[in-house]
Image (tube, rainbow, N blue to C red):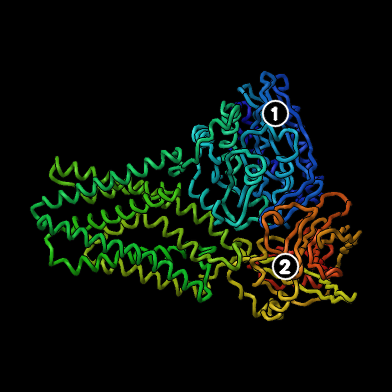
Amino acid sequence: MLYQSEEELHPDKFIGERAMRQLAEYSAIGNKMSGSINNEVHTVNFLLREIQKIKDEARLDLYDIEVDTQYSSGAFHLWGMTISYTNLSNVVVKISQKSSDNENYLLVNSHYDSEVQTPAAGDDGVMVVVMLETLRVISRSEKALTHPVVFLFNGAEEACMLGSHGFITQHKWSRNCKALVNLDSTGAGGREVLFQTGPNHPWLAKYYQASVPHPYAQTLAEELFQHNFIPSDTDFRIFRDYGGVPGLDMASVMNGYVYHTEFDNFKNVEYGTYQSTGENVLPLIWALANAPELDNTTAYEKGHTVYYDFLGWFMMTYTESVSIAINVVVSVAAFVCIGTSVYIMTLDNGADAPKAVVMRFAIIFLVQAGTLFVACGLTLLVAVFMQGVGLAESWYYGKWMAFGLYFCTLFFAFGILPATYIGFTKRKTNMKLDQTIACFMHAQCILLALLCIIMTIMGIRSSYFPMVGIFFYAISVLVQIVLKLTLKKSYFVTVHLLFQLLPFFFYTYICYATLVTFVPMEGRDGPESSPDIMISVFIIATAINYAGFVIPIMHKFRKPKIVFSSFGVITIIFIILACTSAGFPFVKQLAPQRYYVLHTQRTFHNLDGTRKQDSGYYIQPVDTRLHELDDTTFKNAEPESWTAATCAAEPYCGLPLYSGRWIEWKDSARWIYSSPPVIPMNINLTQLSKQSLDGNKVRYEYNLRASDRVMMYIDPLDNVKVTDWSFDHTPLLEKHTPPYLIYAIYSQTEEPLNFWVELEHEEGNTDGPYMKLVVSEHFQYHPEHYTEEYKEFLATFPDWTYTTDWFSALESWIV
């Protein structure tokens, strides 16, 4: 880390210590939910003070620095929700060189708001202070800055990415932003991974490759993210979908266990994060700000990019069309090398006749194909078993459990089946053991090459993944052929293992990075997820690329079957370990099991003017181990039949959902009756008018006063449909199935939410009812109103759990 005392010795360099000191101050503000005083006042003031310090020290003879505090309101549709927002803040800074009048800008974004209860040091405070220090260094430098840079400090990312929507759809500088660098986090610092580019702008990845000294980037991560394997999203989507701005999406991923918890604090941010991230971001911003492509980005829209770093040493990047050529050439070259190798085997005096060699190789290919199928199938079977018997996620904190459960299962199958075949045919062939082993490896390479070609045909850019292993194996076979023809000896084992070192390190590096990133995510991927299957698939996807080239060497041991069987024994031992405390996945503070807990009051209004009211704790698990607390905290929970009955009577089971994802999770929710919460502001819904319209239509207009976060469900009754309303029209135009979910958020305003709904009904139904209208309000940052009973209930959760808790009120009407 560079220190402020060394600043004069390192001009134009990122000073990590300053960023670290700024993060300490930012983190000390505490929780920063959009709409709260901490976010809208204290954090905004912190940013404005730091930006003013930068302006005071800047080379104002070289730069113009403009600062704007934006407050935006708007509406759009995302994640199955119709969203409305009012008066949310952003802090925006534009720096431009006086010598340039260019009107094409580079946009750099991070967010300063937080989720419930967290001080947000990692997500996304680190990136906020990295942006501040980057701005400071640029403002004092004499380096060229051809294009202005807009630094967007975004005040509402966690609240459904509203700050970025407000900027890109409304801000005066948004139309000039031609490219983006988005900085986010899913952990507590560490290396930041580039996991989305473009789309269709390969030049962006080229600049990343050329300028970033510590590359960490994978197309594989991009494709996993874009196919919803990762339970989160970033502002990148909003800039892409609503502004058409291409860019680079980067996020730090270390220690994802603290993500969106109170443990995402200053002390848990990895110490080296500030300097390493700054050393990547600063030169990247400089490079993109001087890129001529910014002047006409559409001219460089040339398809998708394939990119990946190799052990962090360097980065490869090329277009999708080049990727197709590389994959085909490498695969065909592998086929040629393998064919030549088999042909040389037929010429070996110690081998069988040529026809017999070819026949044996064909049989070995079938055996290896079966081995690959059995290895993958058996590994998945173990994962299904672990989930089926309630032992899922035993690797959640102790990642070493994944080795015994899934790696060893795969290695066992990869070894024992070929060993059985070799032992059975040992006396029936003259082929040397080295040649037999080579045939098994040849067969594995052919299978991977076929997989690579299939993935290429399907347009999967991650086809580079098997291509790397195929490339190194083909080179090793080629070297052996040359040695055999020149020195009459191939040095098979030595050459092979030497050429397997780099791919082995590459795949284990990717596997480690995948586990570090995805294992913590599986603890919040929802009760309907399949975490063990997911992790076993990741392990299979990496291990098959080297296991088929490394495991066969073990056939040279004196008793290989014993070696391979030991892998199976290890799997059994680890399954037993998973039944003990060693396999319990959750650890106090370090890797807790998560729950949402809402102290809720519910009121159901009937048509005759009567109402039913109850209150309780709505508990939403977010992982698959649903029964850990059945005998303790949840012992008084209502049975599943209660949930089913409520779901039949009320939209979304009469539960105060707070996210579209909770719709899928609601069947696993728990309800425990309790005394009511203290509600500081009751829901006040006023019907302003009811108008009968032509065409059997009726229009209702409402005024709603409630907390700053409101969810509404609009559920038209049978033979009634919503034809229009004052919200975003996406669900109506795309004919979504009701109930409709509407999310409204307010910031520092007492203005009510005014809205109207137009419904079409049957000709004879002139009096109604027409719909169920449900309103739930959420108080997410007011723990001072928690009742003593609620506090006592939260205390019943074990110390290895973590509750994200608040209180809410729900009211339902039949209209």
In the image, residue 625 above or below residue 162: below
- The residue indicated by pointer 1 is 95
Q: Horizontal and vertical percent for residue 356?
A: 13, 59
Extreme residue in the left direction? 349
- Nearer the observer, 586 or 690: 690
In the image, residue 391 above or below residue 227: below
* Residue contact at pointers 1 and 2, CB within 8 angstroms: no
Q: Horizontal and vertical percent for residue 609?
A: 90, 74
Q: Residue at x 24, y 45 (%)?
A: 336
- Nearer the observer, 665 or 48: 665
Left-right relation of 150 to 311: right
Note whether residue 31 is visible: no
Q: Residue at x 50, y 34 (%)?
A: 206
Determine the secondary structure under disc 2.
strand
- The residue indicated by pointer 2 is 597
Quadrant (top left/top right/bottom left/bottom right) for the N terminus: top right
In the image, residue 679 above or below residue 264: below
How many C-alpha atoms fall within 10 Å of the one at disc 1: few (<14), some, or many (≥20)?
Answer: many
Three-letter code, disc 1: Ile
Q: Residue at x 72, y 48 (%)?
A: 162
Three-letter code, disc 2: Val
Determine the secondary structure under disc 1.
strand
Of marks 1 and 2, which one's residue comes earlier in the chain? Answer: 1
Q: Which mark is residue 754?
A: none
In the image, residue 704 above or below residue 600: above
Q: Residue at x 69, y 41 (%)?
A: 21
Left-right relation of 814 to 266: right
Task: Measure how far apart labels 1 and 2 are at the Cα level.
Answer: 44 Å
Note whether residue 189 is visible: yes
Give the image quarter of residue 732. Answer: bottom right
Q: Horizontal and vertical percent for residue 599?
A: 78, 69
